[in-house]
Image (tube, grey):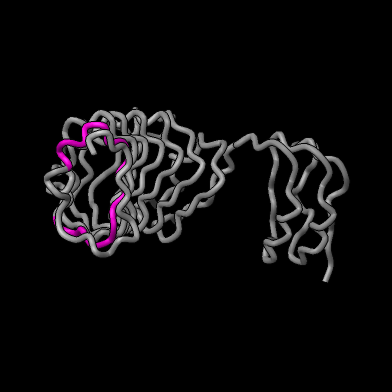
Amino acid sequence: MTALQVLDMQDNDNITGMFPPTLKNLCNLQEVFTGTNLSRDITEQMERLPKCAWDKLQALNLDATNMTGNLPVWLGNLTNLKDLSVSGNQLSGPVPLGLGALTKLTILYLGHNNLTGIISEDYLANLCNMVILDLSYTSLEVVVGSTWTPPFKLIRAQLVSCQLGPGFPILFKHQKGIIYIDVSNAGIADAIPSWSNMFSGQIPSEITELEDLQYLDLAKNNISGIIPQSLATLKGMSSENQDPRQTGLNGPFVQTSE
């Protein structure tokens, strides 16, 4: 089995306890997916992974295993890691600074843990390839400078119940391609900034599914095409303060009435 590259133990509740010591010979291991009953201390578990494969591991999924303890300080040695998922455990303490050395990381799931401390620019400055970030339901605080530009382009960010407020997170100012943000219950007491995100393309007709929408401001973007007539079905919408000249749209703005 020394040529094994993928170890998938998901959906196998009969596997319990610690990783077996025989893993040390799997020097070609690239992906590890665990079951739900491994538990124990996460550092002890990860130290059972073959050290000869540390620079080859690309995916490490330890979600919902009830593991405890702190993330290992040597986390940065997994230099080829692209997917780190440890959500839904009982992890505690700060995130090791070595996380910032994982320059190939694209997916980071740390949510639903008891993690504490600050995630600063030092953690994020080298994560150029990250597209998914989940820190939800932790006690982590994200702190970056007002002039800092992230090197990554997120498409999904879940920061529910993190310590982000009171201002709207500056982290998102330059995330022009992001399609999903959840910052609920994050202590934000500020208005959403009117950053020029330069969105492009047409307004999707599915926008009418937002039945309670009352105000839509798409000014100073590169949106083009025809204004969907279906906007007329949004009873709370008004054309007040809406100027199509700032968007590149064609057609009249709808004015609805009760």
Q: Position of residue 43 (x, y in %)?
A: 15, 47
In terms of image quadrants, where is residue 41? Answer: bottom left
Q: Position of residue 139 (x, y in %)?
A: 28, 55
In terms of image quadrants, where is residue 147? Answer: top left
Residue at figure coordinates x 85%, y 40% from the top left: 250
Question: Which region shows up in magenta?
Answer: 23-40
Residue at figure coordinates x 70%, y 65% from the top left: 211
Does residue 173 sit above or below 157 in this rendering? above
Q: Is residue 34 left or right of residue 245?
A: left
Residue at figure coordinates x 77%, y 58% from the top left: 238
Residue 16 visible to the viewer: yes
Q: Residue furthest front?
A: 1
Q: Could you say which is closer to the camera, residue 91 or residue 94?
A: 91
Q: Is residue 14 left or right of residue 17?
A: right
Q: Is residue 224 magenta?
A: no
Does residue 258 sit above or below 136 in this rendering? below
Residue at figure coordinates x 43%, y 39% from the top left: 171
Q: Could you say which is closer to the camera, residue 179 or residue 253?
A: 179
Q: Is residue 150 left or right of residue 86?
A: right
Which corner quadrant holds the N terminus? top left
In terms of image quadrants, where is residue 212? Answer: bottom right
